[in-house]
Amino acid sequence: MLVIRNFIYTIAFFGGSGLLVFVAFLAIWTSPELLHWAVRQWSKYQYFCARHILGIRIKVEGELSKGPVLYAIKHESMFETIDMPRFIHYPAVIAKKQLFKIPFWGRAAIIYGLIPVDRDGGPSALRHMLTLARKAVSQGRPIVIFPEGTRVNHGESPPLQSGFAGLYKMLKLPVVPIAVNSGRLSPKRNRYWHKGIITYRIGDVIPPGLPRAEVESRVHSAMNALNEPAK
């Protein structure tokens, strides 16, 4: 059943995703509202497939904040990256620039307001990211960043990338760290998606203006609150 569920999920999710991404691409020239709808529907569609095909349920501990904040989120699988527009209202997600090269989706993502980051781009790349982030904040949108920089196996807790501290300092926003344990169920660890519960644990709000060492320590600790030893 595990293999069958994953096969059905792959067909259903990627087939539906192709249609919604194409709708989002067409909406660039027709309707911003349709673009926002398509992005959110893609996120909700992933949730629907995960829930009803894979048997994955979502548990949320704590409450999201209102207004512009900087969400610092653990990254263990593809699930939470696509889940953001469903989980958080109209987020501006900071993502690696390679994702914006995906046909159709890349252009739609830019228009939607996702923020590409070039980890090898130096100060100019950071300034560009900051400009886009400030624009999103001026629109009342929350910023989402995965501070560890890439997906990690469940149980691992690498140090935060330096870009997080720069963004925190320049944006002067409160930070809301969120722990996620999706890696327990994901193919990266198990070969196939397993059924079970993915938990989001929303940490306490961290105020702006703290020293770098303090904010990084608090964020790192809260983001890894659901860690279990890697097996």
Image (cartoon, rainbow, N blue to C red):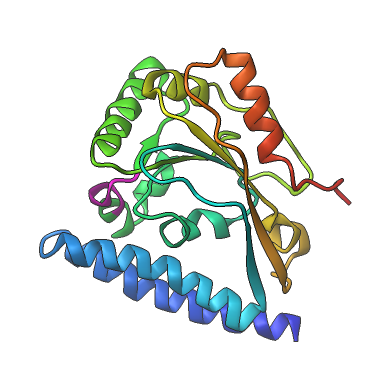
The image quadrant of residue 146 is: top right
- Is 46 drawn above or below residue 2 in the view shown? above
- Is 134 drawn above or below residue 166 in the view shown? below
Give the main secondary structure, helix, strand or loop, of the magenta stretch: helix
The location of residue 162, given as percent across then percent down, is 54, 21
**Which residue lies at the image location 56% right of the left edge and 34% below the top edge?**
147
Please tell me whether residue 74 belongs to the stretch shown in magenta: no
The quadrant of the rendering that contains the N terminus is bottom right
The location of residue 189, given as percent across then percent down, is 76, 57
Please tell me whether residue 112 belongs to the stretch shown in magenta: yes
**Observer-nearest of 108 and 84:** 84
**Which residue lies at the image location 30% right of the left edge and 68% below the top edge?**
38
- Is 128 drawn above or below residue 114 in the view shown? above
Q: Look at the image and give the residue range highlighted in magenta.
A: 109-114
The location of residue 140, given as percent across then percent down, is 28, 42
- Is 200 drawn above or below residue 216 in the view shown? below
Task: Indicate left or right for 219 with 33 as reference.
Answer: right
The image quadrant of residue 118 is: top left
The image quadrant of residue 143 is: top left
The location of residue 15, given as percent across then percent down, is 43, 78
**Which residue lies at the image location 28% right of the left edge and 39% below the top edge?**
136
